[in-house]
Image: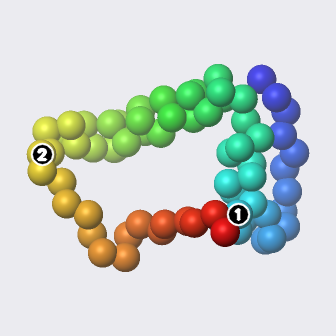
Amino acid sequence: MTLHKVSHDRADETIEAKALWFQSLSLEERMDMLCWFTDMILEVNPRIVEQKDAEAIAGRVLVLKLE
């Protein structure tokens, strides 16, 4: 696993900085994060898998476009 630095700079908390950090992870590390998030969501709300026909909520998704 790659070691990543710890920062206390607010500039490192931008969505762009987070995207760059995520892109710096290996495929294995990205998959570990996906599994971790999935496990966390299921622990908080195990019944989430029972929900069907979910609909998007306006304003809850940020769409990024490469210019």
Query: Looking at the image, which is closer to me, 30 or 47?
Result: 30
Q: Residue furthest front?
A: 67
- Label 2: state its secondary structure: loop
Q: CA distance from mark 1 to mark 2?
A: 32 Å
When asked about the image quadrant of residue 67, the answer is bottom right
Percent across and percent down for residue 27 are 65, 27
Asked whether 18 or 65 is in front, the reply is 65
Q: Is residue 39 left or right of residue 50?
A: right
For the N terminus, the image quarter is top right
Q: Nearer the viewer, residue 13 or 30?
A: 30
Q: Is residue 61 above or below residue 30?
A: below
| Image position, residue 7 (x, y; %) | 85, 57
Residue labelled with disc 1: 16
Residue in the image at 71% along x and 43% along y: 23
**Badge 1 vs badge 2, beta-carbon distance below 8 Å:** no
- Which residue is the site of mark 2? 52
Q: Amino acid at mark 2?
A: Lys
10 Å crowding of disc 2: few (<14), some (14-19), many (20+): few
Q: Estimate the x, y position of residue 25 in percent, counting from the top left.
A: 73, 36
- Left or right of 54? Residue 67 is right
User: In the visual, does 20 lie left or right of 3?
Assistant: left
